[in-house]
Image: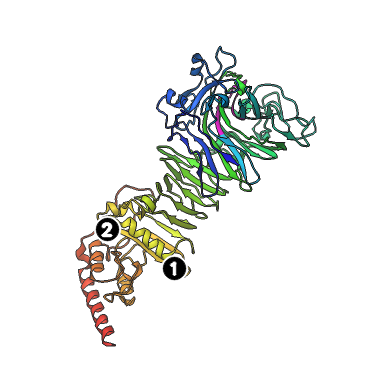
Amino acid sequence: MLGIQRRSGFKAAAAAVCLAGWTSASGQVVLVNETFDAYTSDSEMRATWVPTVGNGTLPANFVDETSGILTTDAVTFPGIEGQALDHVGGTATNPGMVNQYGGVIDQLNGLQPAFQAIPSPTQNVSVSVDIFESGGGNERMTLGLRYIDTSGGSVVTQNILELGLYNSVVTDPTGGADPNFFAGTGLGYRVILFGGFDAPLTAQPNYQYFQLPAELDRPTDADTVTNIGDVGAGWHRYTALVEPEQVTLSIDLWRDGLRNTSKTPDAETGIRPGDPGVDATVTWPVRVTANGFNSLRLGGPSGVTSPGVGAMAFDNVLLQMVDAGAPSNDVVIDVSSGSQTQADAGYPTIATADSVTKIGAGTVVFDAANAYTGPTLVSAGTLRVTNANAVAATAVTVQTGGRLALPQDARLSATVAGLSVDQASGGGLVDLGAGQLVVAAGGISAADLRADIIAGRNGGAWNGAAGITSSAAAAAGGSRAVGYRIAGDGTATVSFAAPGDTDINGAVNVFDLVTINSSGKYGTGQPAAWADGDANYDGTTNVFDLVSVNGGGAYNQGNYFPAAAAATGAITAVPEPAALSAGIACLAGAMMLRRLRWRGRG
């Protein structure tokens, strides 16, 4: 069950907070997807993340509003991605301020919550956040998720879940019997006021800490636990998955997708050693009440703000409903502007994923060999592939507003398990650049592939707004195109090509002319494909295709593909078309003779 309500007068920053009610290909419903990058001022941000106090039912005092500000400070927050929310700490007012999504909640006076998220047998609630911690410790600062009800005239709070930093001594919620209990790290969570709990719990987990990898503990300090001092400064990703009868919490130190065995990055790759996964996770049998959650907040837990000795900031807040059975392995990559590598976005490699969705107007560069097999959806912005195996095991769907791109000036042959390009209302776009995509057997039909290419061809300019095109072909001014071939096993290859390169092997020569001739379709009006010599995509092979071949200037000029190494920015020089004149004349004569003989059989 999911109900979404909007408070009267609530100002939505549509470019910054996505996407209430948005449903992905895998079935998740994104309620809040916040990167803070689209806001132009603190006041604009605070119209969405409204300063409130205590339990979120009252506006903050004006003097407290400086406790939540936008920042781009890469010195204070190394590794910051665009803008983040700097919650600069406590103020003189008690209780301190939090920034609550959607504003003050007071149902009795018409101030409704922005959402209501209730886990069910078919959908769970998933929330994650990146929090920067400077390595100093002694902080109380969290992302909070809870339910707030004022409809009866008094405040009722249920289902308090918090992820972040705390600084108190805690008690084992299992009464000392559970090995997952761990005290003293400072990096923790809170799960209280839920509906009930089961063994091994003897109490609901109130301010507990993650059991972090023992390999990260400094041998020079006095203790044997891994805590904030051992980990040091960094952005860490917290995640919680709430099912009706249990809560799973995890932390990914340095948001690198690894269970780290050292905090020192490799000198060459810049990646810390470790195995794919997270650094700590725990599942507690705690039952959520029937009301679920309607409040999302950033700041001091329950308004008790403690800044400690360093800086803290929040970024990449994601709240969504996810299908039960495929809960936390749906990857959503949001790049609102500019360009990030997949490592920059928090995924150095994607080994497993039930789905990967690219949103935001910016570009994410898949430059690693990813092994995940779930579908990939390019919903907005650009997914740029620079590794041949970046999407080798996934079927990619490019939606309207999305773009899949290969390098323009360097040769890359990338494999993809399937390809679908949305052409409705402008459509999605695949830009091959100077490369090619090899689509696995069954991954696209010949008819769909040809239709996508014709849409991208745009009359021969190769700058269509939808379909499959090539920026490198467009830059070549008509001497290059996009070609394709379907192998006997159904594997489809679509490639930057020169007209007449029937087998798209990078050269136009006499073997291509023989292929065109032997197809038997020249001048007959029979339906023809690129492999039959249909270079201008009019569906037949005739003298106009030979003119296109001649104009391409690649005949007998050797390999016209750009180098596979780093690009220089230049397209391979196009030779004068005279090089093919004799060949064209010979071919035209042979084809005409063949055509006359074919007619004579009648």
Q: Is residue 473 visible?
A: yes
| Earlier-in-chain disc, 1 versus 2 | 2
The magenta stretch spans which residues? 129-146
Mark 2: few/some/many CA within 10 Å (<14, 14-19, 20+):
few
The one of 467 and 165 positioned closer to us in this rendering: 467
Identify the mark at residue 459; answer none if there is no mark.
Answer: 2
Quarter-of-image position of residue 169: top right
Residue on which the image places disc 1: 487
Q: Is residue 139 magenta?
A: yes
Magenta stretch, main secondary structure, is: strand
Circle 2: element type: helix
Residue 299 point in image, percent of width and height = 56, 24
Could you tell me which residue is drawn at 80 percent across and 30 percent down?
175
Is residue 367 rendered to the left or right of residue 298? left
- Quarter that holds the C terminus: bottom left
The one of 283 and 406 positioned closer to us in this rendering: 283
- Quarter that holds the N terminus: top right
Quarter-of-image position of residue 202: top right
Identify the mark at residue 65; answer none if there is no mark.
Answer: none
Q: What's the image's color scheme?
A: rainbow
When the figure is inspected, residue 542 is found, relative to residue 271, above or below; the finding is below
The one of 383 and 304 positioned closer to us in this rendering: 304
Mark 1 in CB contact with mark 2 (< 8 angstroms): no
